[in-house]
Image (cartoon, rainbow, N blue to C red):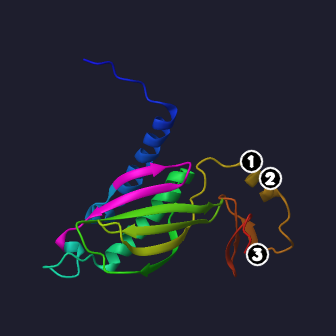
Amino acid sequence: MPARRARTEEEQVTEDALTRLRAEIDRCPFHDLLRPQALHADADAGTVRVGLPFRTELGIREDGDTFHGGVIASLADLAGHAAVAVRTGRVSPTIDLRIDYLRAARGEALVATATVLRAGRSIARVDVHIHDPGGALVAVARGRSAPSPDPTPRPEAHQAAKRPLMGDSRRRLSTAGTWRSSTVGWYSADSTR
């Protein structure tokens, strides 16, 4: 038997990212219905590729091979979420998703490539491109997600909680380190909105 070569550090990082992508796909029961496949993940680049094989129940007609638009949107959502989760190491639910359908999505499978554009402490932005088996672009999506707080509290969040909060008694610092206002909504301490 030939000796097995040791993995390089780069190969190990890629494998860890792919393991995280698979965990994100497996975490949601809805994905059992879709049956997406983790194809590639790169945490440093914030990029993932997810495949979705065609099945009749995912189509617009029983005798066709065209994916339903809702299935395409679901693929964009899960790929975008997974890209942010792989990049940040945290669960990151989608809070906004916009999709443009460019042509009918036909064929035996679709491939979604999601790339994180920016991952801040409270908001991440991601682009998703969905291609058919021939490589034609069938849909593009842009989403925003809210990465969950770190599992361990950050010391700066505790320090910020001790400071006066701009004279507004309705604002308090949550344990996640984000500003919460009872009348305005959620704001991040590092947000530019």
The C terminus, quarter of image:
bottom right
Residue at the location (43% across, 62% down)? 113
Real-space Cα separation, disc 3 to disc 2, in angstroms: 19 Å
| As drawn, 159 above or below 34 | above
Q: Mark 2 belongs to which amino acid?
A: Gln
Q: Position of residue 96 (x, y in %)?
A: 53, 75
Q: Would you say the residues marked 1 and 2 are in contact, meaning their CB atoms lie under 8 Å apart? A: yes
Mark toward the viewer: 3 or 2: 2
Mark 3 sits on what residue? 170
Magenta-colored span = 38-56
Residue at the location (54% across, 66% down)? 126
Circle 2: is it few (<14), some (14-19), or many (20+) Cα within 10 Å? few
Whether residue 44 is in magenta: the answer is yes
Residue at the location (74% across, 54% down)? 157
Mark 2 sits on what residue? 159
Q: Mark 1 belongs to which amino acid?
A: Pro
The label number, if any, that marks residue 155 in the structure image: 1
